Amino acid sequence: MAKVLVLYYSTYGHIETMAYAVAEGAREAGATVDVKRVPETVPESVAKAAHFKLDQSAPIATPTELANYDAIIVGAPTRFGRMPSPMGSFWEQAGVLWMSGALHGKVGGAFTSSATQHGGNETTLFSIIANLMHFGMVIVGLPYSHAGQMSLDEIVGGAPYGATTIAGAQGQRQPSKIELDGARFQGDLVAKVAAKLSA
């Protein structure tokens, strides 16, 4: 049985919602799953003034615990085409794991959100994936076997590199059924690959 960590950063709750869908998919594949988040780096007064979602129930992760998992699926919204600084800072603190090769051969995946359909989803996935590859991880995306991402009937996220959602410029749009199904699909696939590699 694979042990999976869904590690996320969510400003307004969209990625938090996606994270629990990813976790649901991994559990359906038989994995043991923890959902944790990285610490907020914005001062609390600023976060409150900007209406950040501060009541998230997931516990805060520490970099050293990453080595305890067979797979790590990382979720973060886009910030100008790349992962946001709280997630980047978290991984920068994991240098000792990079030095020791503690994550070599473990499975990694990425999911994200953006305000618009062309607002940096894929480049943000790449920024997360590139980071995970530097730690020696094996990457699993969201293949086209999740056919929902090819829909032309509605606005929809999704990319072969990972699950995505479109949040809207004011955060007014929540993840759709297709997008949540994509997150579950990716969680399921990551867990299955991790189980095969750790067998």
Image (cartoon, grey):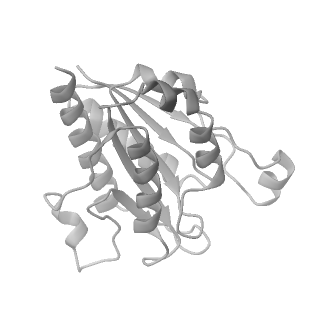
Q: Quadrant of the C terminus?
A: top left
Residue closest to the eye, 23 or 86: 86
- Of all residues shown, which one is farthest toward the right? 45
- Of all residues shown, which one is farthest toward the front? 99
**Whole-percent x, y for residue 140 in the image:** 26, 47
**Whole-percent x, y for residue 81 in the image:** 53, 69
The number of numbered discs placed on residues in the rendered structure image is: 0
Is 85 on the left or on the right of 1, as rendered? Answer: right
Is 19 on the left or on the right of 29, as rendered? Answer: right
Residue 198, quarter of picture = top left
In this view, 141 is above or below 23? below
In the rendered image, is residue 104 in sight? yes
In the rendered image, is residue 175 in sight? no
At a point 24% along the width and 31% down the height, the residue shown is: 194
**Whole-percent x, y for residue 122 in the image:** 40, 67
At a point 48% along the width and 71% down the height, the residue shown is: 120
Q: Quadrant of the N terminus?
A: top left
In this view, 67 is above or below 122? above
